[in-house]
Image (cartoon, rainbow, N blue to C red):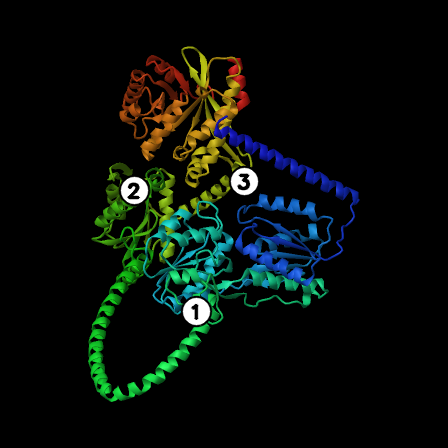
Amino acid sequence: MDINMKNIYFSNKQIIIVCLTIFISLVLDLKTFAMQEGSQHNYDYPHVLLINSYHKGFGWTDTQTDAIIKRFKEYNENIIVSVEYLDWKRYPDEDNLSFQYSLLQHKYKYVTTDVIITTDDMAMEFAIQHRDGIFAGTPIVYTGILEESAISRTKGVEDIVGVYEVLDATGTVDLMMELQPEIKHIFVVCDATESGKDVSAEIGEAIDQSDFDLSYRILDDLSYEEIKTLLKEPQAGSAVIMGTFTMDSQGKQKSNETFSKELAELTTLPMYSVYEYLLGYGVIGGSLLSGTMQGDYGAGLAIELIEGEPIKSLKTVDTKSFYYGFDYKYLEKNNIETHNLPEGSVVINRPVSYYELHREIILIYSGITLILLAFVIILSYNVIMRKKVQKDLEVEHVELLSTYEALTASEEELKAQNEELIEQQEKINYLAYNDFLTKLPNRLHMEEYFEKLIKNSDRLHTKVMMAFIDIDNFNYINTAHGHQIGDQLLQEVSDIFKSYVQDIGTIGRIGGDEFICLIAIDESFDCNNYIDGLMDKINNSLEISGKQLFVTASIGYAIYPDDGMSYDELLIRADMAMYKMKSIGKAKASRFDLKMNQEMSAKINLTNALKHALIKNEFHLVYQPQYNSKTNTIVGYEALLRWNSHILGSVPPFSFIPIAESTGDIVEIGKWVIEEAARFAKRINGLNRDFIKVAVNISVVQLLHSDFVEIVKTIIKAEGINSKWLEFEVTETVLIKSFDLVSRQLKMLSEIGIDIALDDFGTGFSSLTYLRKLPISTLKIDKAFIDDILNEGENHFFTRAIIDIAHKLNFRVVAEGVEEQFQLNYLKTVDCTTIQGYLFSKPLLEEDALELLRNY
């Protein structure tokens, strides 16, 4: 048994044990409830139900929970506190809430609960929504919710009171500037979850309203690794404020404490926070919101309710729940003296001094030393007085000389410090307005430049063109060749943009692989012609560190004031036009028009529906037969994906496949397609007929995953099929994404027995080099050539040439889209005998495809 099989065996065994444990527990619970004959269960002591929004191990949740339990135990040692976790941060979906509701209904249906305490927003909403269904109007005490959010969520709700979560972001910003006044830029580390956005908004508002000239960037659109890469580089005058970051832009999850500690170990930037639970995990400190105080105040309200105080007489607690806290280790790392800290600050990890260890001995020896020193002073006094007059003159002379030398040295030192300050200020100003990697203007620079352009535009009655440029397939390049190659590519592309634009406009990098170009134009300026020239410059093959990369870009542009009156409005619309170009094939450019708003809205609806399509079993496969015209037999089927959405109805593949590729959902969808096709292949090859293949279309996104071949092997083994029953079809455009990586993956698939077919041959960038280097066994001629097959022209010539080349290379040839008898007759004359199209059969449901095979 190999390692993979062992892992599968133990995993299955563990799942069986867990399932049996849950089943036995449920049976025992049901038996207990049955014995109670539906009666209500009353505890001898007060019962409090604590519902947490997040999971055990999340620092903010744990500190509140520990404080609540401690306060109750101090109040009454026998009080019963039941603790539940909704785990909303790791599983933020309705299925999780439905499961939690069913679980709590089962556990507490017959249990009397005196008070419900909730931590954070989702637990409070859950308790409000399900209180009548489970807890029979039990009063609710909430903690950890911002004041504005709490007021809006509890409007019209009876029997609820709580503790406001009051973040002191302003205190942290002011404290940071007091300790390190050289800071000019702040990176705010918060994720894009609901709570993360609330926290980042609080921090951003505090920075905007501060008395300091600060810029900031919220990193909610980056992955863990992208943030690490960004903050690893030395950046003078910059600092970090840690908020809540448990899920990155790619959906990966990690505890806030772990990520904070990892950042602290690699960055040179000072790190602050607004939360107590991050103290001890890499941050210097700050004005820290205390989960302990929040929990203590919330438990205090609950105790008043238990003691009989009417809930209407209780007031929501808005007492400050924060304090100044610091980590000595990181104060020392950043050269911050503890005597500069605010009075009453809490400092952890402070080292024990030698004096504290040996205080008594030091005091004894110090006393003895002082006594001896007093005797020495007395004995020496007479000698000193005798020499005093003589030395006074010498001292005065030395002092005058020292003063002169000190003044001279101070003047030189002040000059050097002034020059250094000027140089540092110039560096800070440059970094604030320019991209570190490409040296191009950054987002802030471009926004200010735009404001200058429109002022001149309004005065001179001219216009401003904004072009939004995005490098196509840049993520593929990073994945296949590494971020170092990606960075070099961005630098090379930036030089190309700059050389083209610099004479009449400005080009800047606003993030990732995104650039914007700003040009003041008049009525005579031809925007289309200018953008076409830019496309010609960038759409080329570039050599980066010995690697040939074919680079293209998609461009959208908008005109001020025709398409928008502000920087943000124009940027959104130019971006919208750019994404429209990506959706229709990339390497194109277009100006914004109003129809794009409607298309973008439709695309968002489709993307949202696609996220749940696989879970809701909305996908199914149809199978189109491949027919040998010589032997009059079915020799294969092509598996085709179909989506019947409960919301959108039937959605064609050309509409949702590109979106699934861009969001990454194609990986799981593609895996499901391979599993279904493998199962179908097993059925048709179990009919004791001739050997029949099932062809499956494979996306480049799947091929770029390093574990794709292992996934295929696992499916083949699980279904118990012969790998030769499968054929994977790839399009010509797949080959140019990352030829080296794709080639390796295809060769490994071929080695395990899977045939590779090149689909839509002749429509893309095919060359004999690809045919020679890749393990291709089948060429599929695109329908466009078949439709025009008898016309005297290029299609006629290419079709015959493709078939001749394929035969000489011993490839199997499949003609797609054969719909007319004359097309079949011609294909027979050129010895292309395998056909696929409506002339023989449309795509069929699985059972219909099996019935056709049985009856043929």
Tell me the amino acid under the disc marked 1.
Leu
Q: Earlier in the sequence, mark 3 or mark 2?
A: 2
| Residue bearing the label numbered 1 | 341
Label 2: which residue?
485
Residue 647 disc label: 3
Q: Residues within 10 Å of mark 3 (few under 14, many from 20)?
A: few
Indicate left or right for 301 with 691 as reference. right
Quarter of the image where one finds residue 539: top left
Q: Residue at x 38, y 52 (%)?
A: 266
Q: Residues within 10 Å of mark 2 (few under 14, many from 20)?
A: some
Against 751, is 282 above or below?
A: below
Of callouts 3 and 1, the N-terminal one = 1
Q: Position of residue 856 (x, y in %)?
A: 50, 13
**Is residue 625 visible from the viewing direction of this image?**
no
Q: Which mark is residue 458?
A: none
Marks 3 & 1, CB-CB < 8 Å contact = no
Q: Give residue 383's position: percent from left, percent from top.
A: 29, 86
Task: Please identify, in this view, whether the residue under mark 3 or under mark 2 is nearer the observer.
Answer: 2
When the figure is inspected, residue 273 is found, relative to residue 597, above or below; the finding is: below
Name which residue lies at 61% across and 60% down: 155
Kindly identify the amino acid type of the residue bearing the numbered disc 3.
Answer: Ile
